[in-house]
Amino acid sequence: MYNEASVVGGVIEGLLPDFPNVVCVDDGSSDGSQDIARAAGAVVVQHPINLGQGAALQTGIEYALQDPGLGCIVTFDADGQHRVEDAREMAQRVLSGEADIVLGSRFLDDRTKLTPAKRLVLRTAALQSRMATGLPLTDAHNGLRAFNPYVARNINLTQNRMAHASEFVNKIAKLAPRWVEHPVEIIYTDYSRSKGQSLLNSVNIVAELFLGRN
């Protein structure tokens, strides 16, 4: 989380009935998000400065791997755009042994409302990712994922900003675990768009992909 004080408490409270071990990686927030997250029932691991989403995910993975009883990690955005129901279903598919990693896709059903321009950009990103890695994903930049300790131990993200999503896919392609995609709904709000879920952000991701910066 990064400056999510207005929403993170509700996100954590929504998760806890299904996910009793919620860890918030605070990426240098200055708005008191840390205190709100703790009060809501999460464990908070803090970065002293803002390092970016990739670094936050890697910190969270490393923290979770310290638990000898770990069965599944779910990556879940702090801004409220993911649905707990989707996360629960994805975790169940990992814990049942069906797959080592379950990747969320907003293109396997029609629940997620996208503008034509954003849909085109995300489809282009998925196509480029498939060409680069051979992994036939329908949605290469979806932050909702569930994976087991085997995958977690073999993911070492070094891209700290948005390019981490492409790096994650590249590492999965090389690792070749048992994987499936799962239909998820992304809930875009004025708040989530203000936090980076804009069309311009998507265009920047595609530009980084084609320029080979990831």
Image (cartoon, rainbow, N blue to C red):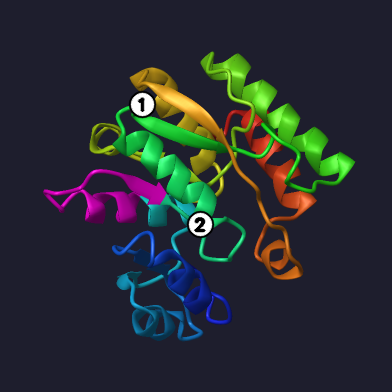
152 or 148: nearer the eye? 148
> x%, y% of residue 111?
73, 45
Image point 74% across, 28% down: which residue?
124
Q: Amino acid at mark 2?
A: Val
* Quarter occupied by residue 132: top right
Asked whether 67 or 98 is in front, the reply is 98
Please identify the residue farthest to the right as the structure is shown: 116
Q: Which comes before the other along the chain, label 2 or label 1? A: 2
Answer left or right for 86 relative to 208: left
| Residue depicted at x 66% and y 51% | 186
Give the label on residue 84, or none.
2
At label 1, the amino acid type is Glu
Q: Nearer the viewer, residue 137 or 110?
A: 110
Identify the magenta region.
58-74
Mark yes or no: residue 159 visible: no
Residue ID for mark 1: 98
Q: Mark 1, residues whose alpha carbon is within 10 Å: few (<14), some, or many (≥20)?
A: few
Q: Is residue 157 above or below residue 84?
A: above
Q: Looking at the picture, does residue 19 appear above or below residue 158?
A: below
Q: Within 10 Å of the Cα at label 2, are there few (<14), some (14-19), or many (20+) other Cα atoms? A: some
Seen in the image, is 173 located left or right of residue 113? Answer: left
Residue 157 in percent (x, y) is at: 38, 41
Residue 8 among those drawn in magenta: no
CA gap, disc 2 to disc 1? 20 Å
What is the residue that sits farthest to the left in this orientation? 68
| Visible residue check, residue 200 | yes
Measured from the top left, where is residue 31 in percent x and y?
51, 85
